[in-house]
Amino acid sequence: MKNQLNLKLDQNDYNSLESIAKDQNLKVTSLATSIFIEALKELRIQKSLEMYQKGEIGLKEAWLLSGLTFIDFFEEMKINDIEPPIEEELDDYTEKIAEKLEF
């Protein structure tokens, strides 16, 4: 099912959109839809990374929310320098264990 969204643009923004659409041989509505969808995808990715980093959702849920493939999601984590949210106590504990294991 598709939903319709109406939006109002000021004249300068509409003129820019119309000019770009003409340059790309597109309808204004097609270009606007494409721009909106790409921006929404990016916002969804950023929101999923943010929620994961804060520990609000787990890795699988963040990946599914992002709409990306698993590999692409990990690439986004790398690009955005996102590390798994680990509580400080657990991080300290594992660090102490790692120190004991060093030869």
Image (cartoon, rainbow, N blue to C red):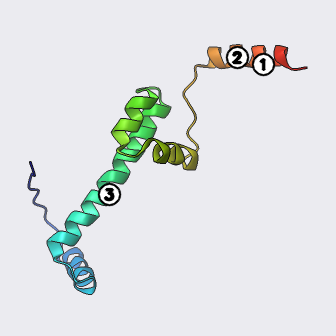
Q: In x, y percent, where is residue 1? A: 8, 48
Q: Quadrant of residue 29?
A: bottom left
Give the image quarter of residue 24: bottom left
- Residue 26 coordinates in the image, percent (x, y): 20, 79
Labels 1 and 3: the sequence-earlier one: 3
The spot of residue 48 in percent (x, y) is 40, 39
Tag 1 and tag 2, C-beta contact below 8 Å: yes
Residue on which the image places disc 2: 94
Residue at 56% across / 50% down in the picture?
Answer: 79
Examine the rendered structure and indicate whether residue 62 appears above or below residue 27: above
Badge 3 is on which residue?
A: 39
Q: Kindly check if marks 1 and 3 are in contact, taking CB atoms under 8 A apart as contact.
A: no
Does residue 2 lie above or below 49 as drawn? below
> Judging from the image, what secondary structure is the residue with disc 3 in?
helix
Eyeballing the image, is 75 above or below 20? above
Above or below 80: residue 9:
below
Q: Secondary structure at mark 2?
A: helix
Q: Which residue is mark 1?
A: 98
